[in-house]
Amino acid sequence: MPAQQADDAGSGPPVRRLVVLAGPTAVGKGTVAAYVREHHPGVWLSVSATTREPRPGEVHGEHYYFVDDAEFDRLAREGQLLEWALVHGRARYGTPRRPVEQVLAQGRPALLEIDLQGARKIREAMPDALFVFLAPPSWDDLVVRLVGRGTESPEERQVRLGTARTELAAAEEFDVTIVNDDVSRAAEELVSLMVDPTPAKDS
């Protein structure tokens, strides 16, 4: 299904039905997505499945579907994941296929907040989607965010920072870059892209 089509009423600007948001670790993808969920209930947000343990405050079925390795293996084996990847060499993440297909069939705007590997796989499966890269204001800012959230061990932080350097270099693969210097501003810019048929290459 094309990601860009006329809205349901047949008037107004075209709507990009599927927007894929990715970016380096700790850049704030989840925070931006949470703002969209709260302030733009008309936008459907995909909930990923993951084998990692929940962080404090995370709710099963709202932030992620937390599953064990055996269940993740079953979902992947049965083709129930639109994409999946091993992230940071530790945990697997994947996008459940059926909810995305159902929402797109209903004509609702959908947002997928996923990792870089997942975004590349979605591009192969759904090239008409709009791909948005969320970038930090600076490398130092990203380091502060990762250390400040205190959810990883020192060893895991080093792994994630190494991954982040590689991920930042992938920004040119995306249609649009949004700098997350303010969560509300970045989220509003992201939502605006769902009704803007000709976004600029960079923000």
Image: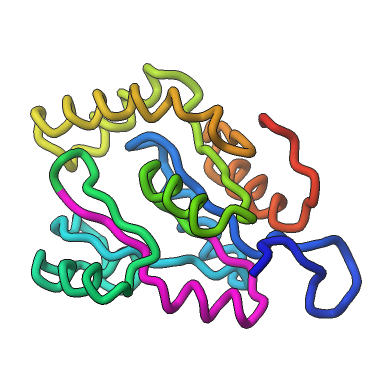
Q: Residue most toward the right?
A: 11
Q: Is residue 118 above or below residue 65?
A: above
Residue 48 in which image quadrant: bottom left
Q: Is residue 183 above or below residue 202?
A: below
Q: Quadrant of the N terminus?
A: bottom right
Q: Position of residue 113 (x, y in %)?
A: 45, 54
Residue 30 in sight here: no
Range of residues picked out in magenta: 91-111
Residue ID at (59%, 55%): 19
Residue 152 in sight here: yes
- Of the pair 75 and 158, the residue shown nearer to us: 75
Left/right placement of residue 121 relative to residue 192 reads left
Q: State the colouring used for the structure image.
A: rainbow
In magenta stretch: residue 168: no
Residue ID at (91%, 72%): 11
> How many numbered discs sit on the rendered protein?
0
Left/right placement of residue 177 relative to residue 82 reads right
Q: Position of residue 121 (x, y in %)?
A: 42, 51
In magenta stretch: residue 95: yes
Q: Position of residue 5 (x, y in %)?
A: 77, 66
Residue ID at (62%, 50%): 130
Q: Is residue 162 above or below residue 88?
A: above
Q: Position of residue 155 (x, y in %)?
A: 8, 29
Q: Is residue 50 above or below residue 77?
A: above
Left/right placement of residue 81 relative to residue 74 reads right
- Of the pair 160 and 87, the residue shown nearer to us: 87
Residue ID at (70%, 59%): 16
